[in-house]
């Protein structure tokens, strides 16, 4: 029997479509580095750059919001400022996006950052567990950095 958690991670490791939220053509930004690697790496699926200030990025038509994407989205890669992540995740959930990877900074240290991190974990847990088919007998391993490592953590 296939575990629902492993099946749900298929959307992260083998997506058929990616919404790159925060995609950018500005050299040195996370949205530029990740998006250009997806494009240059010849990702076989559909890639949708999302940026409210752009009409196209690297010649690919851009969308203002994830809700404007006309086809299903398996994975959202989010590189927006920390204070926008919760609303972006809500948009993704409403749009039916199956998985999300968040690359951001500024969520630790100051009380506001700690509050945002805690709220983010609650929001992700409450909204996404049901969406990916999490069941009572599933087990999760979440590796969170003990020190700031460019905002990266692995689920």
Image (cartoon, rainbow, N blue to C red):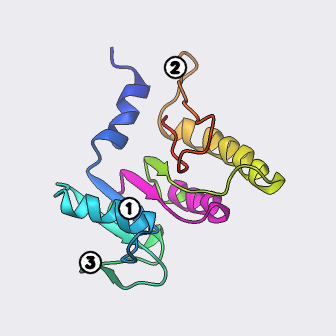
Front position in the image: 110 or 17:
110
Q: What element carries label 3?
A: loop
Question: Tag 2, which secondary structure?
Answer: loop
How far from the left and from the top, in percent, is residue 72? Answer: 34, 58
Check disc 2: other Cα within 10 Å, few if <14, some if 14-19, many if 20+. Answer: few
Residue under label 3, please give it: 58
User: Measured from the top left, where is residue 37 in percent x and y?
Assistant: 27, 59
Judged from the image, the secondary structure of the residue bearing numbered disc 1 is: strand
Q: Quadrant of residue 10?
A: top left
Circle 1 packing at 10 Å, graded few (<14), some (14-19), many (20+), is: many
Is residue 4 placed above or below 57 in the rendered structure?
Answer: above
Q: Please state the extent of the stretch shown in magenta in the rendering.
A: 73-93
Circles 1 and 2, Cβ within 8 Å, touching? The answer is no
Looking at the picture, does residue 130 appear above or below residue 101?
above
Residue 153 on image: x %, y %: 52, 40
Give whichever of 2, 34 is nearer the camera: 34
Where residue 76 is drawn, which disc sits there? none
Residue drawn 48% across and 32% down?
A: 133
- In the picture of the structure, the residue carrying the numbered disc 1 is 19
Q: Mark 2 points at which residue?
A: 138
Marks 3 and 1, how far apart in space?
A: 15 Å
The structure residue drawn at horizontal position 62% and vertical position 39%, both measured from the top left corner, is 147
Which residue: 41% across, 84% down?
Answer: 54
């Amino acid at each position: 029997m296939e575990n629902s958690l492993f099946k749900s991670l298929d959307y992260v490791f083998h997506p058929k479509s990616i919404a790159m939220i925060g995609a950018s053509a500005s050299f040195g930004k996370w949205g530029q580095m990740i998006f250009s690697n997806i494009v240059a790496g010849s990702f076989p699926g559909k890639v949708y750059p999302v940026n409210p200030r752009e009409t196209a990025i690297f010649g690919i038509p851009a969308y203002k919001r994830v809700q404007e994407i006309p086809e299903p989205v398996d994975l959202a890669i989010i590189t927006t400022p920390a204070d926008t992540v919760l609303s972006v995740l809500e948009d993704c959930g409403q749009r039916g996006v199956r998985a999300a990877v968040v690359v951001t900074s500024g969520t630790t240290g100051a009380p506001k950052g700690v509050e945002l991190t805690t709220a983010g974990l609650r929001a992700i847990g409450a909204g996404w567990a049901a969406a990916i088919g999490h069941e009572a007998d599933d087990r999760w391993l979440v590796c969170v950095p003990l020190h700031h490592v460019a905002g990266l953590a692995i689920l």
